[in-house]
Image (cartoon, helix red, strand yellow):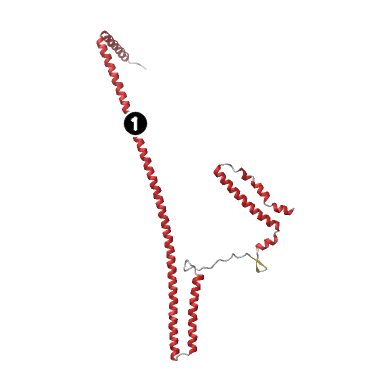
Amino acid sequence: MATNQYISQALAYQDLERLQFSKNLRANPGDYNNYTKDRVDQLADEIYNRKRAAFQKAHIDLARYMDLDHNANFYKARAGDVDRLTTSMSANNESVKQKLERDADVSRRQFEINEWQNQNKLETLFFLQVFFIVALLMACVIYLQKSGAMTYDTAALITILLAVVVGALGVYRYYYTRRVRDGRLWSRRYFGKEEAPKPALTCGGGEITLDTDALLDSLLPAGVKSCSSQAYDNFNKWQDNLTDTMAAYQEDGKPPASVFGKAGSLGGSICSELNTNEQ
């Protein structure tokens, strides 16, 4: 790579110029002192300006950091306000929801009560209408009997029939409303509680009822029944112990090593009485 010869010459001329300038300063002490003072003042000004610029930059950065800290505190306070507001709104919404559900339940129940009362009044009105019609018929029968158009026996028979109809209708209404009709819904009938049917077996085309409990009691020996009861009790105790041990493990963090050791003792103790009886 070729180099420019003028570059080395320019550098040489610069060095010569510096040497000449230094020689002139040394030859004239006043100029040397002035030059030195100017350079010191220039360096002092540069250092002062750099320090001032660095201080200003640090001051600005510190102000920014303080602003960031204040903004973070403001954001924290605003986040807390938003959280409290959200919690309050959620609790209010839950309260409103519960009140709406309660109002819906109360309205539904009130509708059922009103419906039951209205239907009861309508049925009472129907009975009173029947009673009024029967009373008019009985008045007509009495009038015909008094006028001689109807015999006494016929009038008595018709009167008794009408009274029986009215009495039977009133008794049926009272019994059905008080004993059979459901107390909540007017259109629902209460059938009562019935026992579960027992299993039936067919034998030779006929149907027979088999009591399984009595059959097992008669077939199983006393030792087996006692063993089954003992096994049931031991299993309940083992299950309760397992529940307590796991609850203690969740609270204390200790491994439930004692639980696994009880499985063998459970299997060996559930039929201890049966083994004793067999021996």
Quadrant position of the N terminus in the picture: top left
Q: From the top left corner, tell me how far across and down residue 97 is, in percent.
A: 41, 55
Residue furthest right in the image: 279
94 or 203, which is in the foreground?
A: 94
Question: What residue is drawn where x is 70% and y is 61%?
Answer: 219
Compared with 46, 100 (above or below) is below
Q: From the top left corner, tell me how far across and down residue 238 is, in percent.
A: 62, 49
The kind of residue on which mark 1 rests is Leu
Q: Is residue 25 left or right of residue 153?
A: left
The residue beneath circle 1 is 62
Compared with 7, 241 (above or below) is below
Compared with 4, 274 (above or below) is below
Q: Is residue 189 left or right of residue 222?
A: left
Question: What residue is drawn where x is 58% and y is 47%?
Answer: 244
Q: From the top left corner, tell me how far across and down residue 7 is, in percent.
A: 31, 15
Give the quadrant of residue 224: bottom right
Question: What residue is drawn where x is 33% and y is 33%?
Answer: 64
Question: What residue is drawn where x is 49% and y is 83%?
Answer: 161
Q: Residues within 10 Å of mark 1 (few under 14, many from 20)?
A: few
23 or 267, which is in the foreground?
A: 267
Q: From the top left corner, tell me how far across and down residue 2 is, in percent.
A: 35, 16
